[in-house]
Amino acid sequence: MHWPRKLTVVRHGQSAGNVARDVAMQANVDRIDLSERDADVPLSDLGRDQAGALGRWYAGEAPHERPDVLLASPYRRACETADLFRQAGGCADNVPICFDERLREKEFGILDGLTSMGISSIEPQQAEFRRLLGKFYHRPPGGESWCDVILRLRSVMDTIALHHADRHVMIFTHQVVVLCLRYIIEGMTEAEILEVDREGDVANCAITEYAFDAEKGKDGGLLLGRYNVTAPVEQEDMPVTRAPDVIAGARG
């Protein structure tokens, strides 16, 4: 396996969906008030500022520390984060943003757009299934389990190893994807990754970073250097936001 020299995984900036979800939860209503598809939800104004802060933080790094490969979920909020990062000088202007549908948000199926209260009142059978199976294995009708997300991400890692060896690859994606990539790269168990999830949500524009270590395993591997780092946002005194991963409707 030929790994990149560095792999950085970034959750997108705060989205309009994150904001709408918080409003719905505070109001104790069943549904999040959004008119567009999940794929079309844009960044909030704060999310745009967070993405710019991330780019400016990397612009202050040495050129060899900046990414030279950008991969992004095709969902609008991830695309906008990648574009604003590049505009702010986080990488060279001529680095293309390569969209990969395998990096998209976990699909919630019939539970999409529902708050946790909405799941209990509208889809109580699914709420019970999820309680019994856990989020790792529960697949709502028309949606995905974490295992389904992991399956598509394994092929993403194969693609990265095949095409981007010895490069600095940066991925712009979603909360569940960040966690599932950790599960794959670090060889975690279900219990271990769910414990990471319980410890706290992945912040918007937070950095999770791996570096190639020739001493890891037989042929070397990726070693976690930092997880859920919010220094770029904090450096500019912006609010650090973390939309929790509820049963559905997290718009992560």
Image: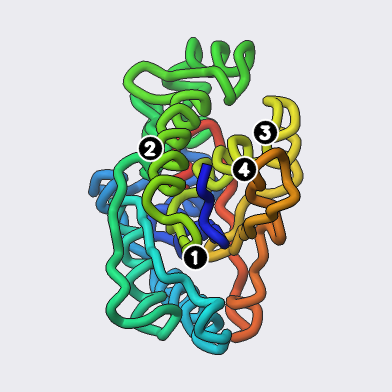
Which residue is labeled 1 in the image? 168
Q: Residue at x 36, y 75 (%)?
A: 84
Which residue is labeled 3 in the image? 187
**Residue 37: image x %, image y %?**
25, 44
Front residue of 22/18: it is 18
Q: Is residue 114 visible?
A: no
**Residue 218: image x %, image y %?**
70, 39
What whole-number distance in Å separates the C-alpha atoms at marks 3 and 4? 8 Å
Q: Residue at x 41, y 35 (%)?
A: 155
Q: Earlier in the sequence, mark 4 or mark 2?
A: 2
The answer to whether 18 is drawn above or below residue 81 in the figure is above
Q: Earlier in the sequence, mark 3 or mark 2?
A: 2
**Residue 54: image x %, image y %?**
51, 76
Q: Amino acid at mark 3?
A: Gly
Q: Which mark, by number, is residue 182? A: 4
Which residue is labeled 2 in the image? 113
Q: Earlier in the sequence, mark 3 or mark 1?
A: 1
Q: Residue pushed farthest front?
A: 218
Residue at disc 3, secondary structure: loop
Quadrant of the image occupied by residue 47: bottom left
What whole-number distance in Å separates the C-alpha atoms at marks 4 and 1? 17 Å
Q: Check whether the beta carbons of the residues at disc 3 and disc 4 lie within 8 A of each other.
A: no
What whole-number distance in Å separates the C-alpha atoms at marks 3 and 2? 32 Å
Q: Residue at x 67, y 65 (%)?
A: 229
The answer to whether 168 is drawn above or below residue 135 in the figure is below
Front residue of 92/139: it is 92
Q: Amino acid at mark 2?
A: Gly
